[in-house]
Image: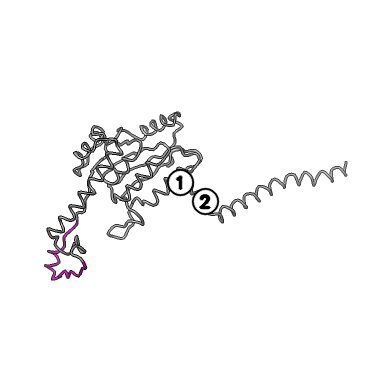
Amino acid sequence: MKTAFKILGPIVLLSLITPILFYFGLKYWGDWHDEWSGFNASSYIGDGYCNIAVLPIQGEVHSYGAVYDEFGNETTSVNMSDALSFLNKAEQEPGILGVMALIDSPGGSAAAAQLITSELQKSIMPNAAYIIDSGTSAAYLIASGADTIIATPFADVGSIGVTMSYLDYSKQNALEGINYVSLSSGKFKDYANPDKPLTADERALLERDLAIWHDELVSQVAKNRNLPVEDVAKLADGSSMPAKLALEAKLIDAVGDKEVARKWFAEQLQMATDEVVFCQ
């Protein structure tokens, strides 16, 4: 018996230690591999439970970098590159079944918004735009690219138009004894400079460009919303409207809270409403 115990003792101990050593070895190897391969669990959108990626469109829409206020503080903004990266990641991530653009933005760069809109339209997954407080101008362009648009009852929607307005400091400069000296290689090279008055020719040039961009914006919104261009053109005076009027104008598809969006995703994905979980 003593001999058997002497033999079995180390075997039992070894059988207990081996799984423990294997577990810690696998864990440390995994951590090391993740670190050096560039993988990071935080790069995932989902947590293994949620299934609808939420793309934040909050603050001014711009092409790259951060946006700062007059005091040098970074403001809430939408970086086009980050948004495109997010949409691409959502498309590739297992477990993500849809995308919701959570919009609270007054607009910004139309070019940046158009690229986000285009990427949203390419998605093979159901996607919705949910407007909280504001979905206007370039932000509305992004919303128009979604499969459906839902807005809260107090949301401000639309403001379809383009602006290049700026402050003219020329009279203030003159009072302070500051003279603007123009040294340009072309007639219009320094046009729209706030330190000089705008000439009639310069105004005509800017208004020409504004008309072209305005028509393009109207055309894209009409196409995205499947509306006649003439109908959108009538609305495109730069004004915005409450969600109720936006629904009547067919700029959005529903007015309600996030549960309306949840129900829409459930219908698209043919699943129970309580199975739709937003990644927030």
- Quarter of the rendering occupied by the N terminus: top right
| Residue 240 in magenta stretch | no
Q: Quadrant of residue 243?
A: top left
Query: Which residue appears at 24% of the width and 35% of the height?
Result: 228
Q: Is residue 78 or residue 63 the one in the foreground?
A: 63
Q: Looking at the picture, how far across and down is residue 91, in whole percent? A: 45, 42
> Height in image: 244 above or below 238?
above
> Height in image: 272 above or below 182?
above
Q: Looking at the picture, how far across and down is residue 102, in whole percent? A: 35, 42
Between the C-alphas of marks 2 and 1, the distance is 13 Å
Which residue carries the number 2 mark? 40
Query: Which residue appears at 53% of the width and 54% of the height?
Result: 38
Label 2: state its secondary structure.
loop
Q: Nearer the viewer, mark 2 or mark 1?
A: 1
Residue range corresponding to the magenta coloring: 166-185
Closer to the N terminus: mark 2 or mark 1?
A: 2
Left or right placement of residue 36 versus residue 3 in this view: left
Circle 1 packing at 10 Å, graded few (<14), some (14-19), many (20+), is some
Q: Amino acid at mark 1?
A: Lys
> Height in image: 77 above or below 184?
above
Which residue carries the number 1 mark? 89
| Residue 168 in magenta stretch | yes
